[in-house]
Amino acid sequence: MPTQRLSVVVTRRLPERVEARMAELFDVTLGPRDRAMTRGELVEAMRTADVLVPNLRDRIDNTLVAQAGPNLRLIANYGAGVDHIDVATCRQRGILVSNTPDVVTEDTADMTMALILAVTRRIPEGLARMQSADWEGWSPNALLGGRIAGRRLGILGMGRIGQAVARRANAFGMQVHYHNRKRLREETESALAATYWDSIDQMVSRVDVLSINCPHTPSTFHLLNARRLKLMKPEAVIVNTSRGEVIDEPALARMLKAGELAGAGLDVFDYTADSTDALRALENVVLLPHMGSATREGRAEMGEKVIINIKTFADGHRPPDQVFPGMF
């Protein structure tokens, strides 16, 4: 007698080949179109599914977890970050949580360097000028940016992505500095030519470019608050490809507008801060719609990890990418 297939609800449309493979293995329910689920739809999905596959736009808080049905035993997140999921409450309810680590490392590091170059070399301004009808040709003093070789890059969060950024920065001739919850091993520091700072305040006050690569946790919420932002040099640049909540976004917008910081490149935002419009109005800011992991290869690999986590769970084993409270 065939084993009953797991009921899997996917909250957002995934790459076609990932959806096709899921349909072969599980009883999959996909949204009719590519949009975020409403709160009510999430509640219904958690009441009926054996496995939920959410993404970073789905807030799975303790109130939502409390409404989960008795069959929900795995939340297989499509993404590495799990700050939108109350992992502790899930664990209390006997619901496992998994994620998709590692596969976005190189793509996100690439985007970090792209933003550093875009801001320091004023690439969006140049693009806009070339596309305008009133471009008058080359000029020796037009759109002068800054050379990144020799500049100090501060990396806040030296995990997989932070280290990948450091390797790229070395190739561009930047001096790498970092702060991390735990200092790297001496051999890793040496390989990355990276200088460790125990004090965030001291590091941010000395770097020319600051890259945010730490996860969003209660301890990193507004890690770059208004006081710490004030410590930075007026000619410094901030790039964030991690989570918007790590920065006090309204304070950042005010300082950028006042010329107290030279520029910012942001791929992530604090959607509760209501400051995106203020940032959008500034010429010294480059904004991207969370494209850091947006490669065809990366999205497919994320889906493959989700499938492996669900399949392993279905076979009665612990998912290889299970997340526990306090891991980040």
Image: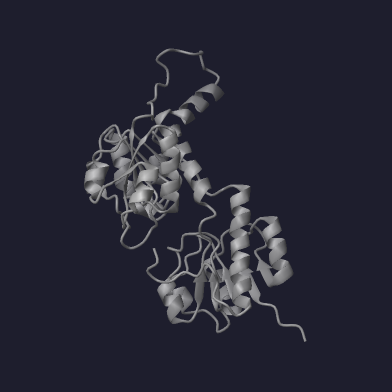
Figure label count = 0
Q: Which residue is drawn at 69% across and 62% down?
A: 19
| Residue at the extreme right | 1
Does residue 226 appear to the left or right of 58 in the view shown? left
Above or below residue 309? Residue 105 is above
110 left or right, relative to 18: left
Q: What is the x, y in percent for residue 98?
A: 52, 68
Is residue 174 or residue 115 the one in the foreground?
174
Q: Horizontally, is 52 left or right of 273 in the view? A: right
Q: Quadrant of residue 282?
A: top left
**Residue at image x 70%, y 56%?**
16
Q: Can residue 264 be seen by looking at this rendering?
A: yes
Q: Going 40% across and 50% down the picture, which residue do you hit?
A: 213
- Residue 157: horizontal and vertical position, in percent? 36, 52
Whether residue 290 can be seen here: no
In the image, residue 133 above or below residue 124: above
Residue at the image position 39 percent from the left and 21 percent from the top: 144
Q: Position of residue 305 (x, y in %)?
A: 59, 62
- Please state the horizontal and vertical placement of residue 322, each as a whole percent of the image: 50, 70
The quarter of the picture where the N terminus appears is bottom right
User: Relative to the observer, which residue lies in front, 194 or 278?
Assistant: 194
- View extreme (bottom): residue: 1
Image coloring type: one colour
Query: Which residue reaches farthest front?
Result: 187
Q: Quadrant of the C terminus?
A: bottom left
